[in-house]
Image (cartoon, helix red, strand yellow):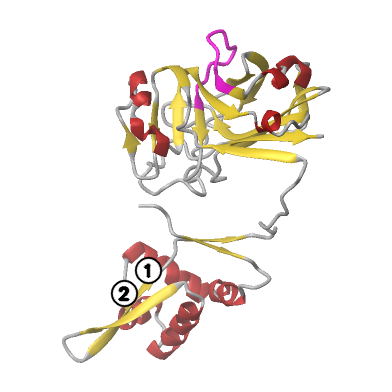
Amino acid sequence: MTKKFLIIDPETDHAVLKGIASPTRATMLKMLHDRGPMNVNDMAAALELPQSTVSTHIQILEDAGLLQSETQKARKGSQKICRATVEEVVIVFKSEVREPRKDMIEVAMPVGLYTGFEVTAPCGLCSTDGIIGLLDVPNALLDPDRMKAGLIWFTRGHVEYQFPNNAKLSNAAIRELEVAVELSSEVPGTSADWPSDITLTINGKKVGVWTSPGDFGDKRGVYTPDWWKLKGSQYGKLKNWRVGPDGTFVDGVQISNVTLADLDLASHHSIRVRIGIEDDAKHPGGINIFGKGFGNYDQDIVLRLKTE
């Protein structure tokens, strides 16, 4: 099952902040997650608190939307059963509302909508509901359900995505191209020290290599579903590749001298983005590509075209 999240704004969601501010209420929520629904008497006994005190805390948690209760028949009379409503509370300090920029064209591509691939096992893909196709069978990446994929992994090879060149359609001159994607290495199990040279190619032009430091599994990814085993890859690093007139950069650090002019985007109606591990990579440590529903960022592969 997919995790139940509550995303709150600390400036407005005061009831939720009040609900989780008490150590006793935090313990109550953890207890409900660990043990499942409980009645008020059992909670009071477990916490070694008066029933009236527990009832007050329950009301605060209900007002915050963190807990639900219902009255059920018992052997003698009735009992109040409580259950937690969410598994994680995410506090967001930045505003998600942004005015659209007139000088930027953005397209998000689900990780499963690749137009071509060539990979070697171990490999596989899965959605938020489960594994898609067969594990470690490269041709399983042809499964039609790949459109639902939120995570793809393989040892060597590549996947390629074809984005529309919307700047050409609108007769806009491109001044920068960006690709944002969450990535990690791939190792059986996980290992924070497992470098892998991940190559980005655009329209057949190798723009540069970023070396992933490892395959991360020290904690569950913020959006990684519960059914995905904790021993598996949990999250990656969100990398921003930028190709401009002065070269190619990853997170502001130059990695190659390939410029926007080298891509000749004006001559193409589409932009082919290839992500993979080359056969001659110094660190052939595999790759995980995280999309919506997995990892720490809950986003597809994003292509941005900054225009004049």
Measured from the top left, where is residue 143 in percent x and y? 33, 28
Residue at disc 2, secondary structure: strand
Residue 148 appears left or right of 290: left
Q: Residue at x 76, y 21 (%)?
A: 260
| Dominant secondary structure of the residues highlighted in magenta in the image | loop
Residue at disc 1, secondary structure: helix
Measured from the top left, where is residue 209 in percent x and y? 65, 19
Residue 24 appears left or right of 98: left
Disc with the residue nearer the chain's start (2 vs 1): 1
Measured from the top left, where is residue 89 in percent x and y? 53, 62
Disc sitting over residue 98 in the figure? none
- Residue in front for this viewpoint, 95 or 264: 264
User: Which residue has dot 1 on it?
Assistant: 32
Q: Residues within 10 Å of mark 2 (few under 14, many from 20)?
A: some
Measured from the top left, where is residue 55 in percent x and y? 42, 86
Task: State the extent of the magenta-drawn residues as a range.
Answer: 273-287
| Identity, as a three-letter code, of the amino acid under mark 2 | Met
User: Which residue has dot 2 on it?
Assistant: 38
Is residue 62 magenta-colored? Answer: no
Compared with residue 64, is residue 179 higher up or lower down, i.e. above or below? above
Question: In the rendered image, which quarter is residue 183 located in?
Answer: top right
Marks 2/1: CA–CA distance: 7 Å
Compared with residue 299, is residue 49 higher up or lower down, i.e. above or below? below
Q: Residue at x 49, y 75 (%)?
A: 24
Mark 2 in CB contact with mark 1 (< 8 angstroms): yes
| Identity, as a three-letter code, of the amino acid under mark 1 | Leu
Is residue 276 magenta-colored? Answer: yes
